[in-house]
Amino acid sequence: GGAGSVAEAAPDLAGAADVDGGRGGYDATWGGWYGRTVFHASGLTGGATSATAWALDATSVSGQAAAAAAEALGVPGEPRLEYGSWVVGPNDGNGPTVQLMAVGAGSLSFWDPTVDVWYCGAVPERSAREGEAAAEPAPDAPVSDGGGVDPVAPDVCDERDLGDAPSAGAAEDALREAMASLGVDPAAFEFAVEDVGDRAHAYVTAYHVLDGQRTGLAWNASFTGAGMASLYGFTATLVELGEYDVVPPAEAVERLNDPRFGAGWSGPVILAGARDAMEVAPVPEEPDGVPPTPARPGAAFAWPVRDVTIVAARLGLAQLATGDGATVLAPSYELTADDGSVWSVIAVAERHLDLSAD
């Protein structure tokens, strides 16, 4: 698609949620009623097959990598290790900062408060760059041990006018350029610019695509009229793990009924958007002060069971956290029900799964 558009040819895999409790960018839930939902397959075809799995190698995260990323993004300073992350730049919110973490798929985060419309502190570097006078500290501002003024957010913070954010096309180009400067190939991504109806901000997402489908991995950036305010993305490289046997779609539906595939993996997962097609419980009326009728001896207890019929299946990839904190992209199914709800479950055959307890 062109600037500001989303290509429909490669939708995200349903579920693409982290097994370690993350959402992978999805608003997903499988509330307490999961144990009272049963699934059936209708009209699903296809037998067992195989699919490629991928490992996410985040071992490249290091102080040297943080220094290189800082140089590419124009962040001054030397890398330092803080709480397991490599950081370059101030940690007081008074200047641009870049941070690298090696957990899971690895991550890089960048924030430049000097181009944030809601930044309220004085940034001498930016003031000098713009030919403005640096703001003087208040007479009663707290003084740090080193004799300087500790940054303190004022009680009232007015939004600064930094001009119009870049257009959709310009914002997309800027994210492509930033990714390329970090050694990330933009050709492996689909770009979408979010229309927020706000002249002061532009938000761009680059969705990672593999074999025509999105993987749940992404880069995100925000821009104001003064430049790129934030950037976040994964740093891991993909390493092919080979072909894995995959269960047929009908067997995948049976897995939705199997607690072994509901407790340890974050599924079955019902996806955002699909819930719109589900029946919503009515909002209870305002209490009228009348006590409820007590249950009668021998009366049946209410135990509603939801019956879901799966009518379509699509094979893709979803992020799966391993026991040691690493992440893989595992073959997984997106299963669509006749009521429009969408569910996901891992598709890898049981012989490739280590079902032993920790």
Image (tube, grey):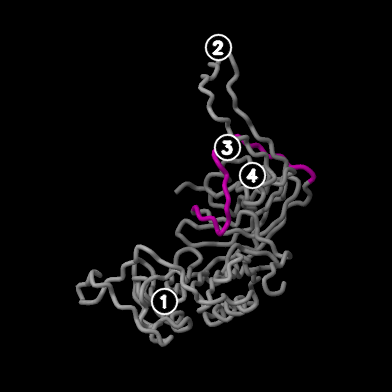
Real-space Cα separation, disc 3 to disc 2, in angstroms: 26 Å
Tally of numbered discs: 4
Task: Specify whether 155 is left or right of 325.
Answer: left
Q: Is residue 336 positioned above or below 107 on the image?
A: above
Q: Is any atom of residue 59 visible in this view?
A: no
Under mark 4, the amino acid is Arg
Residue 242, position as x, y percentages in the image:
63, 65
**For the magenta stretch, what is the residue range?**
21-43
Q: How far, Cα to Cα, is label 4 from label 3?
A: 17 Å
Front-most of 141 and 186? 141
- Disc 1 residue type (three-letter): Pro
Q: For the residues marked 1 and 4, what is the alpha-carbon distance in whole angstroms?
A: 47 Å
Residue in the image at 72% along x and 64% along y: 8
Q: Which residue is mark 4?
A: 255
Q: Nearer the viewer, residue 249 or 207?
A: 207
**What residue occupies the far top of the structure in this picture?**
297
Q: Nearer the viewer, residue 78 or 126?
A: 126
Label 2 environment density (alpha carbons within 10 Å; few <14, some 14–19, many ≥20)? few
> Mark 1 falls on what kind of element?
loop
Mark carried by residue 96: 1
Q: Which residue is mark 3?
A: 33
The residue at the point 64 percent across, 39 percent down is: 280
Instruction: Say what secondary structure mark 2 lies in.
Output: loop
Crowding around mark 4 (Cα neighbors within 10 Å: few <14, some 14 to 19, many 20+) is: many
Tag 2 residue:
297
Name above or below for residue 203 compared with residue 135: above
Query: Mark 4 or mark 1, which is nearer the start of the sequence?
Result: 1
Res 217 seen here: yes
Quick one: label 4 or label 3, which is nearer the N terminus? 3
| Measured Cα–Cα span from mark 1 to mark 2 | 69 Å
Q: Secondary structure at mark 4?
A: helix
- Which of discs 1 and 3 lies nearer the camera? The answer is 1
